[in-house]
Image: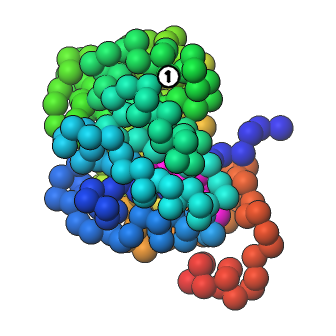
Amino acid sequence: MPLAARLLACLDVADGRVVKGTRFVDLVDAGDPVELARRYAAEGADEIVILDIAATRDGRPATVDVVRRAAVALDIPLTVGGGVADYDAAAALLDAGADKVSLNSAALQDPALIGRVAEKLGSQSVIVAIDAARTDAGWEVYRVSGATPTGRDAREWAAEAVERGAGEILLTSIDRDGTRSGYDLELTRGVADRVRVPVIASGGAGSAADIAEVLAAGGAQAALLASLLHLGLTTIPALKVDLAASGVPVRQASRPLEPVEVAAWLG
C-alpha cells in the first residue's frame, strides 16, 4: 500500500510575523505564526514548517521564543529553519520543541555541517532546504533567502546533502514561488531521481491537481503549502478531499470532523 502523502503548511517569518510574497520578494504580512500554526494543525496539516527568513540576513539564529510557543500549541511534527549556522543552533531549536531543523545557507558554506548535525541529532531530524532557479544548464542553487547565487546545481547539491546525512530535501522553485502556477515538475523529478530520501516540493501550489501532479510526475513524497492557505484560496481539508477523490492516499484528521467544520472548511 502506498504511503500517504504529506501536506505541510509553511510559515515564512520575519520580525515575528508570517509574511508571503512572490518569487521571494514583495512580502506582505500574513498573520501571527503561532496562531496560524495552531489553525493549520487543527485543520489537518500533517506537519508545520517555520522558516525565519530574516535570520541569516541578520546574522542570528531563528527566534527560539516563537519555536517554543508553537511547539506547545502543536501535536504534529514541527520543522524550523533560518540562521542555523552550527550544531549548537540546531540543538537549541530541538531543545525548544522542534522535531526537525532545516539547513540552508550555512550548509552551502560548510557542507560538513550536515554530517555534524546528523551524527548527533539523527538524519531524521535534518532537512536540507534548497532554493533553486532555472538556468540554461539546469537549476542553480541560491542562498540567503534566494538573494545570492552559488553556482551549484540543485540536483548535484541534493545528492551531496543526502550523502552527508540529510534525511529529507525541501526543494523550492524560486521561479514558481507564490505564483500558484503549479510546481516545477522537471526540477522536482530531477532531484527526486538523484536521492533516496523524501523530497518535499515547494513553490507554485495552486490547486489539489498541482499537488497530485508533483507527487506523481514529480516524484515528491510531500507538498509544501503557503500562499494558497494564507490567502484563504482553499483549506487543507478541502485539498485532502480532492486528493483522496483523485486516488492520492492522504492522512486523515486525528479526530472525526464535525459536520459544521466540514461545511465551513469546504465552503
Give the vertical position of 50 relative to 32 (above or below).
above
Residue depicted at x 16% and y 37%: 147
Instruction: Confirm whether the magenta stretch covers residue 179.
Output: no
The foreground one among 133 and 131 is: 131
Q: Residue at x 57, y 16 (%)?
A: 119
Residue at the disc numbered 1: 117
Q: Amino acid at mark 1?
A: Val
Q: Residues within 10 Å of mark 1 (few under 14, many from 20)?
A: many
- Residue in the picture at 48% in, 16% down: 116
In the rendered image, residue 33, in percent from the top left (x then y), is placed at 42, 64
Q: Nearer the viewer, residue 88 or 122?
A: 88
Residue 25, can we see it? yes
Q: Is residue 225 above or below residue 144?
A: below
- Hey, which quadrant is residue 100 in on the image? top right
In the displayed orientation, state which residue is furthest to the right.
1
Model colouring: rainbow
Q: Is residue 86 left or right of residue 96?
A: left
Q: Residue 157 location, x and y as percent? A: 37, 17
- Rendered location of residue 149, percent (x, y): 17, 26
Hey, which quadrant is residue 240 in on the image? bottom right
Q: Residue at x 25, y 59 (%)?
A: 15
* Magenta segment: 44-50
Q: Is residue 154 in view from this perspective? A: no
**Image quadrant occupied by the N terminus:** top right
List x then y, in percent, for residue 18: 34, 63
Secondary structure beneath disc 1?
Answer: helix
Viewport quadrant of the C terminus: bottom right
Q: Magenta span has 46?
A: yes
